[in-house]
Amino acid sequence: MSSNVERWERKYALHPVVAIVITVVITAAGVTLVGSFISIVHSAMASKHWSRTEGVITDSRWQPHKGQDGSAIVTYTYSVDGRTYEGKDLLAGGGRYFAEEEKAKVKQYRLGMTVPVFYDPQDPNCSCIESGYWSWVSVGPLAMGLLFLLIASWHAWRLVNKKPILGRPVEPAPAVEEYDFLPKK
């Protein structure tokens, strides 16, 4: 015999195929976010061993964004084997700083200033001006990715155990009736 709550859950449960698709999408999002964190940290650590050359800051400004703080735009040019490249990454792998730190970087890297540039010898287009560092702002994708994976795990557990995953109920959950807190012998 099922309780009124179990009947309510079955009434508003998502179709199993829809629940599986949602679980797969959440899992993919979680893996992607965790992967981006790993990529940023890996690039930061790899940049410690990159080649070094001198570069010149060609643009350094704060770019406000509508509804957000904004971001630092720091562009630099550098030469490798007689060929000129343009870079725009402060940190390797596209890592970012928090907004206040980025504002300070705009002041630190002034237009026309000569700076050390670290570049990947296998791909000189890949460069940064702060080698070996990654910012704590990179932990955001890791936290979100782990949260998504936790939710996907919960969904998977419910699917494997044939428990319904609720859609959008149109009525509130009922009060518990017909439920035995102590099993009968």
Image (spheres, rainbow, N blue to C red):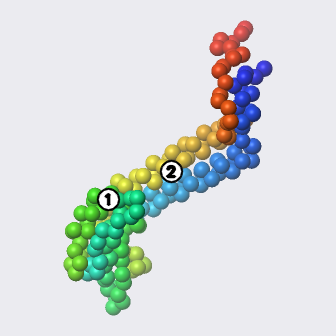
Drawn side of residue 142 relative to residue 182, left or right = left
Image vertical order of residue 169 relative to residue 66, above or below: above
Tell me which amino acid carries mark 1.
Answer: Ala
- Residue 152 location, x and y as percent? 60, 45
Q: In this view, does 36 lie above or below 183?
A: below
From the viewer's perspective, tell me whether residue 59 is left or right of residue 179: left
Residue depicted at x 65% and y 28%: 173
Outermost residue toward the right in this view: 1
Q: What element carries label 1?
A: helix
Q: What residue did someone put label 2 on?
A: 145
Image coordinates for residue 162, horizontal then vertical, percent: 73, 35
Q: Residue at x 63, y 41 (%)?
A: 155
> Mark 2 or mark 1, which is nearer to you?
1
Which quarter of the image is occupied by the C terminus? top right
Residue where numbered disc 1 is placed: 99
Where residue 165 sits in the image (x, y, percent)? 67, 38
Q: In this view, does 98 lie to the left or right of 10?
A: left
Quadrant for the N terminus, please. Answer: top right
- Secondary structure beneath label 2: helix
Q: Can residue 95 be seen in this view?
A: no
Residues at badges 2 and 1 in contact (C-beta under 8 Å)?
Answer: no
- Residue at the extreme bottom of the image, as rendered: 82
Q: From mark 2 to mark 1, how far is it between C-alphas?
A: 22 Å
The reply to whether residue 184 is visible in this rendering is yes
Mark 1 crowd level (few <14, some 14–19, many ≥20, 10 Å Cα): some
